[in-house]
Amino acid sequence: QQQVKQSPQSLIVQKGGIPIINCAYENTAFDYFPWYQQFPGKGPALLIAIRPDVSEKKEGRFTISFNKSAKQFSLHIMDSQPGDSATYFCAAYSGGSNYKLTFGKGTLLTVNP
Amino acid sequence: DVKVTQSSRYLVKRTGEKVFLECVQDMDHENMFWYRQDPGLGLRLIYFSYDVKMKEKGDIPEGYSVSREKKERFSLILESASTNQTSMYLCASSPLSDTQYFGPGTRLTVL
């Protein structure tokens, strides 16, 4: 079964810290790796995504680092704020999957003031 | 903006009841999905549909069925609700691409 393994399950940092969430995958057919952010009481929303032809993508304070040979990717949040407290899901997609995403199990991030 | 709406935010049902969860999207997307979200288990795909009247099983279809009679509407049906189906149910839609747009979720409690 295709899997995406996400760690840690939960993470607590102080305001201004740089939380890092890691994901690993097995299926080399995956060619798109999005991160979704979910606030309490809301559905997940696309935050940032990367394709395997680049090693890093940055959007504002959010950065994805991608290591194709290790089949790993990670989300870094620079200068984290209490408003970043949410659950983060990594996911992976392959073009042959009928548009299905394979999700990690999620990381609950708490940023303390 | 893409809008995906779900018929109820909270729902309480009794064991054995038939339960309908409805999802509507307003962006003419071809694909629609139903997930359930449980603590520590993440998002698990129940069913998805890639066209009207077309459906495909996801990872955990047992105990569920779906209906898609119109492009904008995708219904999840629990034929006989059980307590282990107490969960958060999320609907999503996507065009013919890799981005999914989620609704706000329905928190279902089965007593």
Image (cartoon, helix red, strand yellow):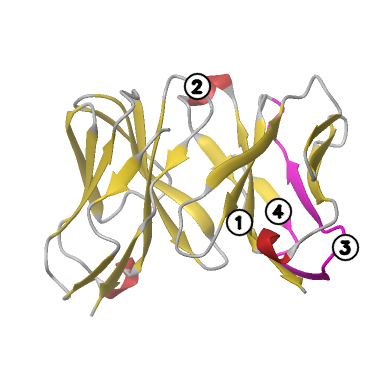
| Residue B80 point in image, percent of width and height | 15, 63
* Residue type pointed to by label 1: Lys
Determine if the magenta segment contains residue A14: yes
Have a look at marks 4 and 2 and say if they share a chain. no
In the picture of the structure, the residue carrying the numbered disc 3 is A17
* Disc number placed over residue A6 in the picture, else none: 4
Give residue A92's quadrant in the image.
top right
Q: What's the distance in space between the residues labelled 4 and 2, CA to CA?
A: 23 Å
Where does the magenta region start and end?
A7-28
Q: Which element carries disc 4, helix, strand or loop?
A: strand
Q: CA distance from mark 3 to mark 1?
A: 23 Å
Q: Is residue A67 left or right of residue B55?
A: right
Residue at which label 1 appears: A105
Q: CA distance from mark 1 to mark 4?
A: 6 Å
The amino acid beneath tag 4 is Gln
Residue identified by numbered label 2: B97
